[in-house]
Image (cartoon, rainbow, N blue to C red):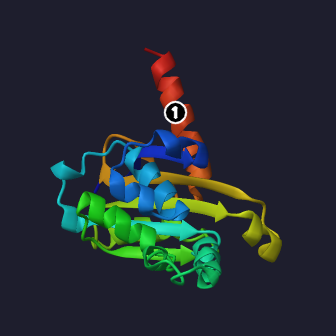
Amino acid sequence: MNEVLVTATSAATQADLPNAKMGSRFGRMDLLSQLALLSVESLGVNFESMDRTRIAICMAVTAGSLPTDIEYWKGRREPGGPSPTLFAYTLPSSAIGEIAIRYRLTGPNLCFVGSRANLLNEARDLIDREEADACICIECDVVTAAIATITGLPTKAQARAAFLMRGTNGFLLKENHRDIESVCALVSAAEAARNSSR
């Protein structure tokens, strides 16, 4: 049986958003969904060549939808009340929905709030249990100044993504690979070494 491999990785920051060409819907999304979607787009995976019912999405979000929740709550003081468009993003898993809509993916999905410790293991398990043939893993950190004050976390706005599937071409995902940041660094180093030997 083939091992679970990381076949693509990517990252997106708030600085990347102004140059994103993702359609008019993209501009109406909250920051968390924009970053998550852009990181998946940057993977460069051709989802059309796969069975989209068998592609899972697993996402870990540091502060959940709290940044959007606060903005929505502030809207109660505005004429007309809180934004109904913003309301759609007051769930931490809203970004998963946006990814599924854009790529027409109907496989299983999971959203972890606060901790990313189980993200890659759960993705691998979905593939090992044959509930999915592949899995998009996204780690998204959106901590605004308001959230930093409440939680003590440092401010940031970034997302990383990895695409996992069985195969023979890619970076072997081992049991001790626990977070996307280190996996992205290892994949980049392996690609650089491969390119320099050519």
The residue shown at (43%, 74%) is 85
Q: Nearer the viewer, residue 191 or 93?
A: 93
Residue 87 screen position, x and y as percent: 47, 80
Callout 1 secondary element: helix
Q: Nearer the viewer, residue 192 or 36?
A: 36
Q: Is residue 77 positioned above or below 175 on the image?
A: below
Is residue 175 visible in the rendered image? The answer is no
The residue shown at (61%, 51%) is 181
Type of the residue with mark 1: Ala
Q: Residues within 10 Å of mark 1 (few under 14, many from 20)?
A: some
The residue shown at (28%, 68%) is 132
Residue 144 screen position, x and y as percent: 70, 64
Relative to 131, is 178 on the left or the right? right
The answer to which quarter of the image holds residue 97 is: bottom left
Quadrant that contains the C terminus: top left
Which residue is farthest top? 198
Quadrant that contains the N terminus: bottom left
Residue 128 screen position, x and y as percent: 34, 68
Is residue 48 visible in the rendered image? The answer is yes
Q: Which residue is mark 1?
A: 190
Q: Is residue 142 positioned above or below 74 on the image?
A: above
Q: Nearer the viewer, residue 117 or 86?
A: 86
Give the number of marks: 1
Residue 40 screen position, x and y as percent: 41, 52
Relative to 135, is 142 on the left or the right? right
The answer to which quarter of the image holds residue 114 is: bottom right
